[in-house]
Amino acid sequence: MSRQPDEPPVEARADSASEAHSSGPPTLPEDLLLLLFRPEQGVIAGETTLFYALAGAVLADLALQGALAAQRTRAASVDVQAVQGKAPSDEILLDAWKYLSDGPRGVQTVLPAIGPTLRQPVLDRLLARGDMRKEKRTVLTFFNTTVLREGHSGRRAGLVKDVRDVLVDGKEPTAHTAALAALIWGSGTLHQFDPEIPWNPSVIDRARRLEEGNWGAGATGEAVTRTMTAAIVNNVISATASVSARQ
């Protein structure tokens, strides 16, 4: 998949410090990146296609806030556009909202446009919140390197439990958790959570239902929001599969 000539990537903001801190609750992209972090290895799962997943999380977060509208085109693709008067207070989400304020854009175009600059500011927030930390190490007694470690907030364990409750135990999710679980599935990394979240047919079936927007009565939100989030996740799946096929 290639970016359209008239769709340049969204540039990183000059003041990264303001992006690194958020006074509000963690956003969907923050929770997604924290879940994709593998504490045992000190790495983030799905790095090669991570920006698609993070971009999808941004769009899904905007959709859940009612700040994003979507429409299907004649070619059966999905266009998204910012809802005027619904500007989010979060800086990272606001950047994407502003980018989408000029007019409808195809999701497959938006993902590679806003995704590449997301990893660092989202990671900076997790570090600032204490959800993750950096640790210096010396390799071969000569080279200093920095590795990622889990922080002491315990928030990742709570997120894993929330997703596990939905995918393993069949608990009805909140809209936030439903979108989060669907994005993990869409990123192609769900199998890497085994044994935290067992990789078995029932889990796969529940993940697919979330992908389709079947969140149950417990997940508040209009049906159109669920449909929009499902369309976003499906575009993440398509983009991720396209990259994987080229590797």
Image: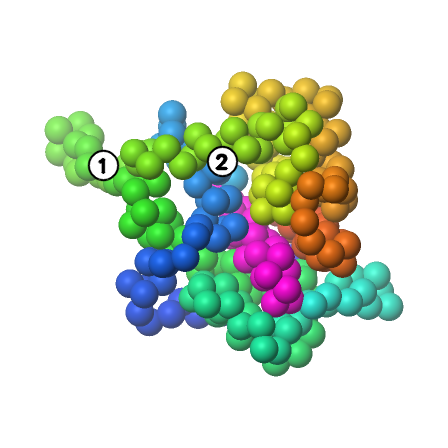
Q: Quadrant of residue 4?
A: bottom right
Q: Is residue 22 visible?
A: yes
Q: How far apart in space, not on screen, are marks 1 and 2 (Cα)?
A: 23 Å
User: How far across and how far down the image is residue 18, in percent?
Assistant: 32, 65
In what quadrant of the picture does the N terminus appear? bottom right
- Vertical comparison of 198 with 2: above or below: above
Compare marks 1 and 2 and give the one earlier in the sequence. 1
Judging by the rendered image, the residue that carries numbered circle 2 is 159
Q: Quadrant of residue 170?
A: top right
The amino acid type found where label 2 is placed reads Leu
User: How far across and how far down the image is residue 111, in percent?
Assistant: 60, 59
Name the mark on residue 110.
Answer: none
Task: Tell which residue pokes out farthest to the right in this image.
Answer: 74
- Vertical comparison of 140 with 208: above or below: above
Decide: few, some or many residues near mark 1? Use Cα within 10 Å; few <14, some 14-19, many ≥20.
Answer: few
Q: Is residue 49 magenta?
A: yes
Residue visible at 76% across and 58% down? 224
Judging by the rendered image, the residue that carries numbered circle 1 is 135
Residue visible at 52% across and 29% down? 161
In what quadrant of the picture does the C terminus appear? top right
**Region of the chain picked out in magenta, as a range:** 47-68
